[in-house]
Structure formats: structure tokens, C-alpha cells
Amino acid sequence: MMTKVGFLPEETSSFVGRRAELARLETALATRRMTTLIGPGGVGKTRLAVRAARAAADRYPDGAWWADLSPLYDDALLLPTVSDAVGLADHTLRMPVEALCEWLSDKRLLLVLDSAEHLRAPCSHLLAELLTTSPGLTVLVTSRQPLGTRGEHAVRIQPLPVDGAPDALQLFEDRLRAADPHAGLDAPGDRAAAADICRRLEGIPLAIELAAAGIGRHTVAQLATRIGTRFDAPVDAEDLTASRLDLLADDSLWPRRHRTLRTTIGWSHELCTPLERLLWARLTLLRTDFDEETAREVCTGGPLTPQEVDRALQGLVAQSVVQWDGTRYRMLDTLREYGRMWLIELGEERAAADRHARSFLGLARRAHEGWTGPDQISWYHTIADTHLDLCAALDHLLAHDVAGAQEMAGRVGFFWACCGHLSEARGYAHRALEAGPVEGPHRTRLQWVLGVAALLQGDFATAEKYGALCTAIALYDHDDEGMLGATYLSGLTQLMNGEPAAALEAAERVLRMTETAPPDGGPDGRRATATDTATDTTTDTTSEPGACESTASGPGASEPGEDSAPLESAHRLRCRLITVFALTALGRLTESGRAAAALRRACERGGEYWTRSYADYQLALIALLQGRPEASAVHARAMLAGKHRLRDSFGIALGLDILAAAIAAQGAGAQAARVYGTGHAYWRMVGHPQRGTPELGPVRETCELQARAAVGDEAYQRAFERGQADNAEVGLAAALHSDLQL
């Protein structure tokens, strides 16, 4: 949920008590650079951290940002997770920690790391570096133990008071009414019984919430009796399975002094049906929030049919073992730990990991097939949101199913490259190639991912190498899609190196080579290529400002027969994009404009947004070069709207530059300066100075000079600094409005 600036989790249930703790935290955050909330699992550290961070957020010009570390089972993804949390999508070859330190170095923000106890040493090391290099950084951590970082201020969180204060009882009643609005403590003896339950549970919030969830199967008095019986009974190694799990618990995670919480979770476990217990265990493999379909894919097997998974999932929600926010499910890390012990006890760990990996390999396949289609945006977000599960699945496949890992790394690699996960895309593709022999399209795809990631990181030599390799392998394999992909990679590398003629020649040749004759093909038996369309078309859709005025879906005028034309593959559309870029770089603007408009329509027919946004970008650049800045601004905003939907920070940075130039060319110097400032913030986000093909440099310089001349250097600098200081989302939203105000 977005605060004034930054992102914090949304609070989906009532917050009870904790006034003294919040006051202590307010003082700590104002006077200390690092504060760690420590206490046992289930004591309420996360909820308290959310509330304290939200209350303090306005004091930090660069916001309050949240990183949930509970899904991380080792430190390999610690840096990417923290980088994602603070909005960094680094596109450089720097060490990730160096990029993160540089990104935070001049910011004044609050960073919250939640559930750091299992990564104490790596978190301590990372925070020591960040706090040294980022003087405006304040850190709030939740952990069961202090991290041991120099300067750390530990605040121990105790359970809710149960004697002389109503907090624990209020929490019990709130959760009771949340589950059933008609429930309450109105029957004789209910309030006393509930107070007894809270005392038995020692005021531990998670234990109280689990107990309140049990009211659906018992009265309050019955619940108090059952809890009392269980807590008064000795723990016996021969007792029920839940007690066996109590004994199996690792004292480092479940200290004996916290037996109350262990026993409460075990009691909740006993209340579950056998199938609910089995589902609880199997769900622990999921690192991120999930939906019913994912639960069925990962957990179905043996007695758990898909229908039983659905039924058991609702049972776990009713008992507060699984949380439901209206769209997605999630499990608290404390309950996940307990379920993981049950999974190990059942001997199902490997089988569950196999199912998890197969499920996310299937997800990667479906996303890859859906890249060109009406669900592209949804798939793009799904791949981004399930990043930790995809990494876990890949790690498992690399150890147990190399062929599956090779396929998966190739299929998710381009998504990851576009999401800013360049290091992961490159790292997993390299590991997959090194893991064993791979032939055919999977090999071409892996090498293509390596090349694209290298290109986006500015490593043009490596990109050129893999472009040549992909071309040779695709030719050998007679793989048309591989050829188109290789040509896109090689062509973009040539464009970045200032060789547009070579890029155009190669793209046109491969588009012809891979073309098949459509049913109504021309006399030469092939469909027209992008440059054929540019030459033969009589309607110039770039001549009017409104040609692409609908920012996300507005088409230009269709050519005769276009509506019935076959949908083109993602690789083919990207290869056509190379011809558009090359024609623009060569100054053949009329041809380029027609080709870009035709490409945009082809993307629109297939529901493709990524390439379509770059077609909008080219239409904006062409209009600007032709002296039509109003039309350029319309196309630039269309590009930005598409890239924003895709969360493509690199594309947004390019789009803001061209929009600022179009605004400057209209004489609005201060507005242009503010948009340039927001663009600079996005360039910093991806770790690069302004980038793009070589012909963009003179355009930027000319338009910046126009903006400065229009308002003067001092006013220009003030507006630029305002845009640079804006939260990136706020600045982008302002830029997307045509009536941008200072």
C-alpha cells in the first residue's frame, strides 16, 4: 500500500494497544539510525513495525520502504529483495551491494527489514555497509534476536498485558467479531472465560488470534476448558503428533520458554482435519502470496484432490492458519515454520519440492506463450510477483532436473530482464548452460537471455558475442524464432554501437527469410515486411497528433486487410522494431513513421505492450525530429503509460526524456525541466546515466538548451531539482498529465 512516499504493507485487521511501545519506537526512530524489534515469534513485531513506520513515514522525504525477508531460505536473494524494496532496478555490471549503496547514498528514507532472524549475519553485514555509506538512512528491523550490528538499538517486545489492561481481551473479541460479526462475549461467563484464555496464552497475539479462530467449533467456555486441559497436561513424547512436533522443535527457533506459542499452534494443528494438516505442510513450499490455482498445483496429490485442496484451504483460512486479503492467500512465517516441521516429519519434503518446481515451470511456459496476447500485462506482473518462488524452483531443478531448469531459465529470462532482475537472468542462464548439454531452442533461448541481459547492462561486447552465437545455432537448427530473436539482439547491439545500416540490412533479410505466405499473400508469395509497409502505405499516421492519442490502446488507422492479418510472434515484432529504430537513425523519417505505426497496430492486434511502447517511443522521436512537438508529446505519454503498466523503469526513463524534449520544444521550459528531473531519478534507479541510441544525444542537448533559454538557468534548475526530488511514481503521474503544473 502506498503511503505519502514509499510502500508499506496494508493493515487488514484492527490494531490493539501498544501505546507505550509505539511511543518508544517514535523516539528510537527519531534519535537512532538502527532499531531492532526483538521478541519471540507471534508476539506482534511485524504489526508493530508497520504501525510505527506508517506513523513516521512523513518525516522521511524519500519515504518508508518494506522488505519481507521471511520467504528467503538463504542469503542469495537478500540483496535483490532489499533492492526491489527500495525501488532499485540496477542495469549495470556493478556489484549489487555497490549499486544499492550508491542508490541510497543521498536519500533520507526509512527501510524496514521484517523477519531477519534467519539471516542475522548477512543482514548485519549489509546494514553495516548501508549505514556507513548512506547518512540519511534509518533502519527498523524485526527479529527474534539482535543482529549484532554496530550501533544497533534493541527494543524488546513483550506480549500484550493480561492483568490490569484490556488489550489482550480486546484483541480476542476483535478477532472473534472479524470471523463472525454476530459473535461476541455476551453470554454469561463468556467474558471471564475469554480473559482466562488470554491469561493461559500469556498475551501472545498470534496465540490469541488462533484461539479466537477456534470459536467456530466451540463455545468460549468450551474453548477455555480445552485450552486449560492442554496447557496443564505434561508434554509426552508418545502424545499426539502435535506434541511430537513440539519435541522436534529446534530450540534456536522455538525456545522452551516460548512453549505457550508452540503449544497453541500444536493445539490449532490438532483442530485441523487430517487433510487440512497435510495442506498446511505442503503450502510451506510457497515463498510468496498465492491463489487457489497455485495451491492446487503445488499441493494436489494422494488424498488431496483439487477439490479437497479448495475445501481444506478454506478450513485453514477459517482457523487463521492462512490469511486471505480478498485476492491472495499467505501464511505467517511462524506458522510456515511449524508446517515445514510437519512436512519433514511426513517425509514429503522432496516430493513437495518436486511439485512446486513443476508448478512454476508450468507457470513459466504459460507466461512465455502469453507474452504476445491480451494477458501480457498480467503475465508480466505474475512473473515479477512470484520471483522468489521462481528462483526456488530453478534452484531445485538445477539440482534434480537440469533439462527443466534449462527450459525454465530461458522462458523467464526476458521477463526478468525487463523487470530489472538482470543479475538473476544472467546468473541462472549461465548456470543452466553450465549444468549439462542442451540442444535446440532451449540452448538458443538461454544464450539469447545472456546476450539481452548483457546488452541492458551496457556490456556490448558480450551481447555481440551471444548475438553471433544465437544466429549460428538458429541457422544450424533451422529455428526461425531463434533467428528472429538473434537478429533483434544483434541489431540492437549494432544500433547502440552506431551501426544502423548494418542493423537494418540484417533485420530486413531475416524478416524475409522467416516469412511464410499468408492466405491472401502478394504475387511473390510472402507477407510485406516492416519496410515494405513503410514504402507502400499511402496513409501517414504520424501526421496527426491524435494518431495514438489513447495512451494504452488507441490505434492508428488500419490498413486494408490488417484486421484479418495473422498475429505475429513476439520475436518477429521485436525484429520489426529494429527496422524502425534503424530507419530513424538513418534519417528516413517518413518510412520510419509508417513502419512504426504499422508495427504499433500489429502489436495492438495481438495485445502486445512491450514492443508497442517502443513503437510509441519511436513515433514520439520521429514527430519531434519532424518539428511536431505536440504530436511527439502525445506519443511519448502513450509510451510512458505502457511502460508504467509493465513496471519497466528503463523504458520509463527513455520515455520521460523524449517527453521532456517535446515539452521543451513547445516553449514550456519549466515543465520540461521538471520532467527531465523525474527522468533523471529513473535513470538513477536503473544505475545508468542517460542512455539510448547515439542519435538521441543531440536531441536531448538541443531541447535542454531550449528549455533553459525559455525560463533562465535559475528557474530551470529549480524545476529540475523538484522533479528529481519527487517520488518517482508521483513525478511520473504528473508527467502523464498534459496540463503539468509546477
Image: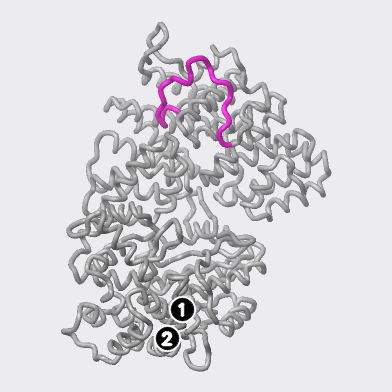
* Residue 106 seen in render: no
x, y percent for residue 577: 50, 28
| Marks 1 and 2 close (CB-CB < 8 Å) | yes
> Which secondary structure, mark 1?
loop
x, y percent for residue 527: 42, 15
**In this view, 398 is above or below 7:** above
> Which secondary structure, mark 2?
helix
Measure how far apart labels 1 and 2 are at the Cα level.
8 Å
Query: Could you tell me which quadrant the N terminus lies in?
Result: bottom right
Q: Of the residues shown, which amino acid type is indicated by label 2?
A: Asp
* Residue 376 seen in render: yes
In the picture, the disc for residue 681 is: none
Camera-nearest residue between 82 and 187: 187
Q: Is residue 399 magenta?
A: no
Q: Locate residue 344 relative to residue 541 in the image: left or right.
A: left
x, y percent for residue 230: 28, 87
Quadrant hosting residue 643: top right
**In this view, 723 is above or below 441:** below
Residue under the image location 29 percent in, 60 percent down: 311
Quick one: label 1 or label 2, which is nearer the N terminus? 1
Camera-nearest residue between 491 and 613: 613
**Which region shows up in magenta?**
552-573
x, y percent for residue 98: 51, 59
Crowd tier of the residue under label 1, counting other residues whose Cα lies within 10 Å: few below 14, some 14–19, many 20 or above: some
The extreme top residue here reads 523
Q: How is the image coloured?
A: one colour
In the picture, the disc for residue 184 is: 1
Quadrant hosting residue 187: bottom left
Q: Look at mark 2 in the image and give the residue it sits on.
A: 190
Main SS category, magenta section: loop
Q: Of the residues shown, which amino acid type is indicated by label 1?
A: Gly
Crowd tier of the residue under label 2, counting other residues whose Cα lies within 10 Å: few below 14, some 14–19, many 20 or above: some
